[in-house]
Image (cartoon, rainbow, N blue to C red):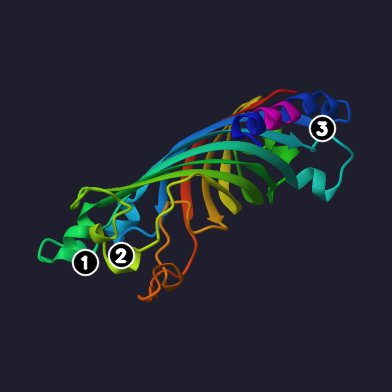
Amino acid sequence: MNIKLFIIASLLFVFVGQEAYSQYGVSNELGVFVGPVLFRSDYGQRKDSETNMKNSGFAFGVAHYLNFAYQAPSFFNEHFKIKTELDYITASFEHYGEWVADDKQSIGADQLRAMSGSTTVIEIGSMLEYYPLSIIDFEYQNYKLAPYIGLGVHWVNFSPKAETSYGTKDIRDPNNYPDKYRNAFQTESGSTWALVGSLGVRYKLTKTSDLVLDSRWSMYASDYVDGLNPSLKNNGSTPVPENKANDWVWWLNFGYVFYLD
């Protein structure tokens, strides 16, 4: 399915369904979120602080919540919300760490320093949020803060890019990068799934609005979200023991949520 049609259909499903849910005592909330992302990719040295901080980007999202607090009292209704969201993430990558330090003067080091990449990611999916404190007590402003944790699944579309300024400046030319990166690049768009977890807190701003601070992780089921996956299977000759996991991203986001009813 064309990604634009998929997104439009998903948003229509959410907003058309809003009226139906309201008839059954389920209230609706809309939220917007922005913030920086740190992308754990295959660029840079593993467990290197510069790699972890500089392979980064920015994200924003919109979300719809189903709030069951005004239905018949039950543990689920008083402590859970369902969040459906659409997120846009962009990040850029370079090699950082020991092997590209200034004192490393070799063809391999020059090739690594010349490599760069980027990706654009769209996520859409749902998450179940658990609030340890009573949701309805928070909405009646009996307290100002409402912490929560969440877990969900997202469908993911990614569009990576990779380039080099070395030699012929063609990322497809194997003479422009170390052997471990042979057949490791994917610059075509693709799709996958993500397991998403979050930890956050709401602050009661007014009776009908909240501020949100949210820390979120998306663990992708693909190692090509960044456009790079070095492995012995791909290059046929060089083991890559440091590539131990698929790509994942951490997003610290700040949000505003408005209660529709």
Residue 87 x %, y %: 55, 37
Tell which of 159 and 254 is nearer to you.
Answer: 159
Q: Which residue is mark 1?
A: 99
Answer few, some or many: residues within 10 Å of disc 3's Cα (few below 14, many 20 plus, some between 14 and 19): some
Q: Residue at x 62, y 34 (%)?
A: 2
In the figure, 75 relative to 87: above or below? below
Report how far apart the C-alphas of labels 1 and 3 lie in the structure. 55 Å
Q: Judge left or right: residue 7 versus residue 253.
A: right
Magenta stretch: dominant secondary structure: helix
- Mark 1 in CB contact with mark 3 (< 8 angstroms): no
Residue 45: assigned label = 2
Nearer the observer, disc 3 or disc 2?
2
Report how far apart the C-alphas of labels 2 and 1 lie in the structure. 8 Å
Q: Judge left or right: residue 242 versus residue 205.
A: left
Q: Judge left or right: residue 159 versus residue 180.
A: right
- Magenta residue check for 214: no
